[in-house]
């Protein structure tokens, strides 16, 4: 009986070690992702939205704040072109960390948006899920939000009594 219990315990431990060895551990790909971000920044900063859209997978999704999901390269090109037309002239991305899991990576970063004259108009943080296709990293899911506080709500207008209007 003791021999059987011992063999069962050894078998269970062996299976647990085998399973643990099969789970892919994250790999630091921060340098590779930073390089891919340089292409994104150069494309935006030179106003080349077509090149910027090529930084994304074919069916990539943007999840911008206060907006619907933007999907696909064509719509992503339009979205970022709109940001450029609204006065964003430069983007700076800083990778804080990027963990790779085979052909997928998860990046955490900080973004700064500038207008003409290098004036900061927004600072925020982001998470990007990257996909590696044919040895090259592409943005696949891109979500961000501002680190700036929301503006103060406007003061409510005083209520006017109906008889005051008639006078």
Image (spheres, rainbow, N blue to C red):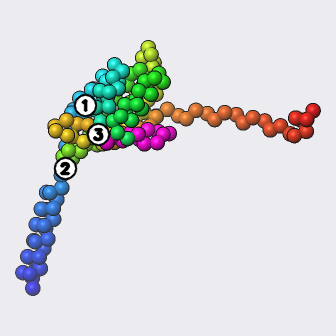
For numbered disc 2, what is the local secondary structure?
A: loop
Q: CA distance from mark 1 to mark 2?
A: 22 Å
Write down the quadrant of residue 96 in the picture. top left
Query: Residue 50: x and y, percent?
Result: 32, 27
For numbered disc 1, what is the local secondary structure?
A: helix
Query: Residue 89: x and y, percent?
Result: 41, 20
Write down the quadrant of residue 91 in the picture. top left
Highlighted range, magenta:
59-70
**52 relative to 166 in the view: left or right:** left
Can residue 7 be seen in this snapshot?
A: yes
Can residue 97 be seen in this snapshot?
A: no
Residue at the image point whose x is 45% and y is 19% from the top: 115
Residue at the image point whose x is 16% and y is 37% from the top: 135
Q: Quadrant of the N terminus?
A: bottom left
On residue 58, the disc is 3
- Residue for badge 2: 25
Of pointers 1 and 2, the one earlier in the residue sequence: 2
On residue 36, the disc is 1
Q: Crowding at label 1, few (<14), some or many (≥20) Cα neighbours within 10 Å?
A: some
On residue 126, the disc is none
Residue at the image point whose x is 28% and y is 39% from the top: 57
Between disc 1 and disc 3, the foreground one is 3
């Amino acid at each position: 009986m003791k021999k059987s219990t011992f063999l069962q315990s050894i078998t269970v431990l062996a299976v647990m070690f085998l399973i643990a060895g099969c789970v892919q551990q994250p790999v630091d790909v921060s340098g590779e992702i930073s390089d891919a971000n340089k292409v994104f920044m150069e494309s935006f900063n030179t106003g080349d939205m077509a090149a910027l859209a090529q930084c994304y997978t074919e069916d990539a999704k943007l999840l911008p704040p206060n907006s619907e999901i933007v999907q696909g390269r064509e719509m992503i090109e339009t979205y970022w072109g709109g940001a450029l037309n609204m006065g964003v002239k430069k983007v700076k991305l800083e990778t804080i960390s990027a963990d790779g899991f085979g052909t997928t990576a998860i990046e955490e970063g900080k973004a700064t948006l500038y207008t003409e004259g290098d004036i900061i108009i927004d600072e925020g943080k982001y998470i990007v899920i990257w996909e590696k296709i044919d040895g090259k990293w592409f943005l696949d899911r891109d979500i961000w939000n501002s680190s700036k506080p929301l503006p103060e709500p406007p003061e409510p207008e005083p209520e006017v009594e109906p008889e005051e209007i008639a006078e």
